[in-house]
Amino acid sequence: MSTHAEREIASQPEVWAQTADFFPSVAHLLPKKGERVAAVGCGSSWFMSQAYAGWRESHGHGETDFYTAREFAYNRKYDRIVTITRSGTTTEIIQMLEKVKAPSVVITAVAGSPVTERATKSIIMDFADEESVLQTRWATAALGLLRMSTGFDLKSIIKDAEIACASDISPLLDVEQISFIGNGWTIGLAQEAALKTREAAQFWSEAYPSFDYRHGPMSIAQKGRATWAFGKIDPKLADDIRATGALFESSELDPMAHLIRAQRVAIGIGLKRGLNPDEPRGLARSVILK
Ligand code: F1P
C-alpha cells in the first residue's frame, strides 16, 4: 500500500473497534432520544451528517435535519446541533457555530481546534484522524459513533468491514462511470462514495435516491458503466438496471462497510489514472476562507 489513503481505508476495522470502545466515554454528550436535532458538516462531513440524520430519524430517535454549514436554517428551532469536522478549522462551520443559539456538540479529530472554542461540547476522536487530504476512516468513524448513539452495536459490523477490505474490486476499476444510489440513510453514503471517486480519481460519478434514479438519471446506465446500490433496493429496479447492460453492484454487507469497497474503488481508479489520492486536485485538508 503506497498511499496514506490506502492504509487509512484498510485501518477501518481497527478504528471502528476503537470508536466502539470510545463511545461510552462520550455517550452523554450526544443527542437524547426525542430531541430535535440538526446535523451539520461540509464535504464528506456533510454527507455523514446526511446519513446520520436519515439513520437517527428512521430508528425513531427524533426529527433530524442535515445541512451543509452555509445553508443552515437559523430560523428553525433545534434542541441540539451536531457538527462533524475532521480538521476543526472549516470556516463555514466556525461561522455557523458562532451564530446558532441551540447547544452544540462538535465531533472533531483535533483537540483545541477553533471549533472546540465555539461549540458547547466537543468530542475529540484523534485516533481516527488522517494524513491523507481524502477523508475515509474519519468519515465512517464519526458516523459509526453517531449510529452507536441510537443503540447500534458498531462492533457487530467489524467483520463486514474486514470482508469489504479484502474483497475483489477489479471489475469496478475498468468502468467509465458510476451512479451510486441509496434509500433513506444510505443516500448519504451514495453521495459520499460519489464524492470519493471525484476527489481521488477526477472520475465521473453521480448519486441519487434509488427511486428517483428511474426519473431520468438511469438514462446514463449502459454497458461499460456501473450502478452501485447501498442497502436494499427494489428488486424490480435492480432488474431494470441490469437490463441496461450496466454492471450492477450491491451487497449484503452493512452499507457503511460497503462504503469501504467504494473508497477502495475510488483509490484504485485514481491510481490507475496516475493520480495521488492523498493530494486531490485543488483540495486542501480543509476550506479556510479569508
Ligand atoms: C471538510 C472538507 C472535506 C473535503 C476537503 C475540504 O473538512 O470539505 O470533506 O474532502 O478536503 O474539507 P472538515 O470540516 O471535515 O475538516
Image (cartoon, rainbow, N blue to C red):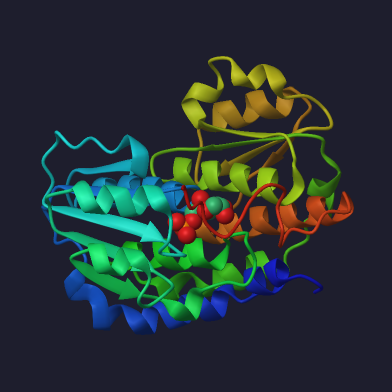
- 3 on left or right of 140: right
Using the image as rendered, state which of residue 45 and residue 55 is in the foreground. Answer: 45
* Place of residue 133 in the rendered image (x, y in percent of width and height, measured from the top left): 62, 61
Using the image as rendered, state which of residue 4 and residue 206 is in the foreground. Answer: 4
Question: Is 215 rendered above or below residue 46?
Answer: above
Q: Is residue 68 visible?
A: no
Q: Residue drawn at (73%, 23%), measured in percent from left and top?
A: 243
Q: Is residue 246 visible?
A: yes
* Place of residue 159 in the rendered image (x, y in percent of width and height, measured from the top left): 55, 74
* Place of residue 44 in the rendered image (x, y in percent of width and height, measured from the top left): 50, 51
Task: Residue lying at the far front in this picture: please name it.
Answer: 290
Question: Is 224 rendered above or below residue 188?
Answer: above
Residue 151 found in image quarter: bottom left
Question: Is 126 rendered above or below residue 36?
Answer: below
Q: Residue drawn at (65%, 52%), measured in percent from left and top?
A: 262
Q: Residue drawn at (48%, 81%), measured in percent from left and top?
A: 127
For the N terminus, the image quarter is bottom right
Using the image as rendered, state which of residue 148 and residue 3 is in the foreground. Answer: 3
- 283 on left or right of 149: right
- 232 on left or right of 35: right
Q: How many marks?
A: 0
Q: Residue drawn at (11%, 51%), measured in percent from left and top?
A: 79
* Place of residue 41 in the rendered image (x, y in percent of width and height, measured from the top left): 39, 50
Using the image as rendered, state which of residue 149 and residue 49 is in the foreground. Answer: 49
